[in-house]
Amino acid sequence: MRSSDLLLSFAATALAARPFLNEPDTGIDDVMGNLTAGELPPLDQIIGLPDFEWAFRHARPAKNYTYYRNGAAGEWSYRNNLEAYSRFRLRPRVMVDITNIESTLSTTILGHNFSAPFFISPAARADYANEVAEAGLVQGAYEGNILYMAALYAKLSIEEIAAAKPTNDTQVTFQQVYLDANDTATKILFERAEKAGSKAIVFTVDSAADGNRHRALRYGVGSADSSYSYITWDYYQKLQNMTTLPVIIKGIMTVEDAVTAVEKGAPAIMLSNHGGRQLDGSPSALEVALEIYQQAPQVFNQTEVYADGGVRYGADALKLLALGCKAVGLGRPFMYANAYGAAGVKKAIDIMKHEIALDAANMGVADIKKINPSFMKWENNNWYS
Ligand SMILES: Cc1cc2nc3c(=O)[nH]c(=O)nc-3n(C[C@H](O)[C@H](O)[C@H](O)COP(=O)(O)O)c2cc1C
């Protein structure tokens, strides 16, 4: 290659490069950049979900932020989770009466009524955000009338989270579990969850081994050991006989496993790569949902399909709902919002509801429950090309 050609090819590569925007620049630094370290911006100045991350990063210790923020290895899956939504364009329709859109937000999840088709995904260590820990999440979920999935590795115990519910009788929560194939311990755990009022078990299956977490290990908040868990389809069937609660499978990443989950009688599955924290290279939920839509669309009718990872805007949620997902989960945004306690969590819920309604209306969707794949262009478009 001639030196001038070489130079041109370098220039082309440099031009093709573009920054990864963890928190897209919408001016928050200009408006709030002079806050003193450790200070949270006033809650009424939080505009969108990414602002909660900005606020958390400024106000909480780097170690706490790193635990929430980290992804596995080089964090390609973490970044892809956020970027995948921008690769698929919307197909907005016009001249549609969308004036009742807000009244169509409510939905059911396994038969339980909620005010919106999104929920708080299970995430450990809420005390890194706030001393009220999971109480902020469960109370915020109550106030916003959405589902809270409690993490097993929470700061508060299953019973303490139940006791933190504003009304213990009526608020529906689900309990996430990691299991170690000890049947006696598993039965006790399931009984505790049921007694505490959980209406479903969320069995996380994407973490057969610990995540390889470079960023978090630097701060001593990564997975330091190398334990391996026994997670098989046979084991799943055994679990279903250990409780009367529905056992949801969290962490489906291929169409094959989605189909098998249906065959094994899963009442619901969650498409998730654990927020890109487990296996770098694993696909985003949007990519998995698309794979299922293209190769086995019946799955969306045979079981309830939820999805999480990288959802930060109303339109992100709508893209998953358009493919047939019943509800979408958010992990980090609620963990960051909990720096403000229940009020922050409630504000995050309100923002998300507002954005889903606005974006659906601008897409010409009259009823969120009727959104369908025709509202999207399912070719993979690179926004930057
Ligand atoms: C700090 C943190 C802790 C998490 N802990 C758990 C956990 O204990 N169990 C689990 O199934 N998933 C856990 N997850 C994954 C979330 O349930 C969810 O899949 C993920 O956060 C979704 O991606 P998002 O953060 O981009 O919304 C955790 C995620 C985060 C960010």
Image (tube, rainbow, N blue to C red):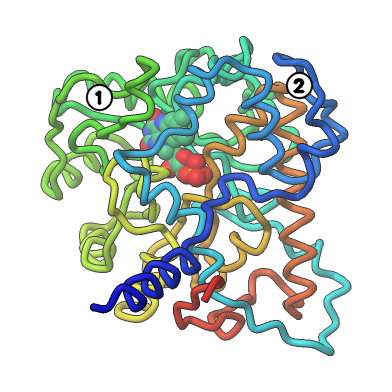
Q: Which mark is residue 40?
A: 2
Q: Which is in the foreground here, disc 2 or disc 1? A: 2
Q: Residues within 10 Å of mark 1 (few under 14, many from 20)?
A: some
Q: Which residue is mark 1?
A: 187
Horizontal side, residue 374 vs residue 104: left or right: left
Q: Which mark is residue 9?
A: none
Is residue 268 visible to us here? Answer: no
- The residue nearer to you, when weighing 4 against 375, is 4
Q: Position of residue 208 (x, y in %)?
A: 19, 38
- The residue nearer to you, when weighing 105 against 256, is 256
Task: Classify 10 as above or below 80.
Answer: below
Most extreme residue toward the front is 3
**Amino acid beneath label 1:** Lys
Among numbered discs 2 and 1, the one appearing first in the sequence: 2
Task: Classify 159 as above or below 124.
Answer: above
Task: Classify 219 as above or below 107.
Answer: above
Q: In whole angstroms, how far apart are the C-alphas of marks 2 and 1? A: 42 Å
Question: If the image is split into quadrants, where does the N terminus sit?
Answer: bottom left
Q: Quadrant of residue 142?
A: top right
Q: Identify the secondary structure beneath mark 1.
A: helix
